[in-house]
Image (tube, grey):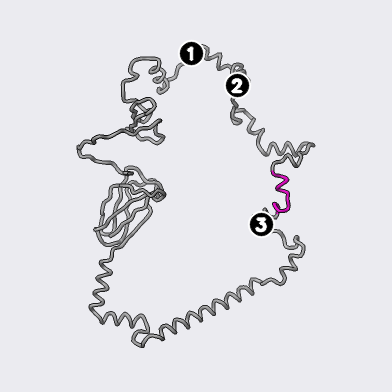
Amino acid sequence: MDILTNLNMHGNQILDVSIQNLAQAPSEKVIGQVYYNTQDKRVYCWTGDIWLALDAKDASPTAVSIVKTINEGSALIKQEKIDGLSAKLSGASLVQAINSGSENINAERIQGLTAALNIDTIIGKINEGTKTIDQDNVTGLVEALKNDTIVSGINAGNKTINTDKITGLDTALTNKETPQGAQEKANTALQQAKEFATSEVTRIVGGASEAYDTLKEIEDALKKNDSLDKTINKALKEKTGKFSQDIGNGASVEIGVKHNLKTQDVVVTLREKASPFKVVYADIEITDENTVTLKFAKAPKLNEYRVIVIG
């Protein structure tokens, strides 16, 4: 169940409740949020800066608590205070460690390497040289140069080939229908359709008696029958209506929905727009006979929910 607004318990207790169990801290968090870490068996609260453990497990200055305090703090230890660190960070030491290791450095971390590996640079070097690349060594080139592949690429593209470049095409197109001729045929078909529709309407109207051969005469006849008129109007007035609309813009926590059902006796349902279409809950106010207002603790994303009003 998703509740999208704050719960006011009015001083009542929450009984037999469990804090959310997670193997690691939530990626989305708000100040004051708590959870129970199932790995280190501790309860944490988000302060806005760190996940603060809500126990005294590391209160004594043990090695673990000292390291944890350093890792979570904002103060820095001077480099010269760490034995051997300066030597480890020297250029010669770093290069030796890199050459001896099995890890790779990202290309963008090596000055000038990204530019040297740029596709334009590589192609420029190839074009300026005297060497050639074997066709078989260019992945996909042989396949791309096949007749079927070229024809398929032409058919899938949006470029056109001049007709005079295709042998026999101009001759083949000579006997084809012109756009003007096609338009004339379309106009003729449309006129025939209009004439057919007119004749059918005339036939239907002509099939009724003179007193009922137009909608106006039917209306007059209904008005003369006062009881029937009242019955129809009463049924229309008492008919239950339904209105639905997608809501959410990523900014508003209060959203007014105008349903125009002309009653405050409405039932309002809110559900997810996407699968699994769960029903969710927000504060709902029946503002007036044509409007309801939905209030959220956090602004819904663009068209995240769908509201259904029945009344």
Q: Report the residue at 75% width, 42% height from top.
A: 135
Q: How far apart are marks 1 and 3 (CA)?
A: 68 Å
Q: Position of residue 52 (x, y in %)?
A: 35, 26
Judging by the rendered image, the residue that carries numbered circle 2 is: 101
In this picture, which residue range is highlighted in magenta?
A: 140-150
Q: Which of marks 2 and 3 is nearer the N terminus?
A: 2
Magenta stretch containing residue 309, yes or no? Answer: no
* Nearer the camera: disc 2 or disc 1: 2
Relative to 288, 179 lies left or right: right
Q: Which amino acid does label 2 sit on?
A: Gly
Residue 27, given in percent of the width and then of the height, sits at 41, 34
Please state if 94 lies on the left or on the right of 16 as rendered: right
Tell me which corner region of the image, top left, top right, bottom left or bottom right, holds residue 16.
top left
Q: Identify which amino acid the numbered label 1 is placed on.
A: Ile
What residue sits right under mark 1 in the picture? 82
Residue 300, compared with residue 56, is above or below; it is: below
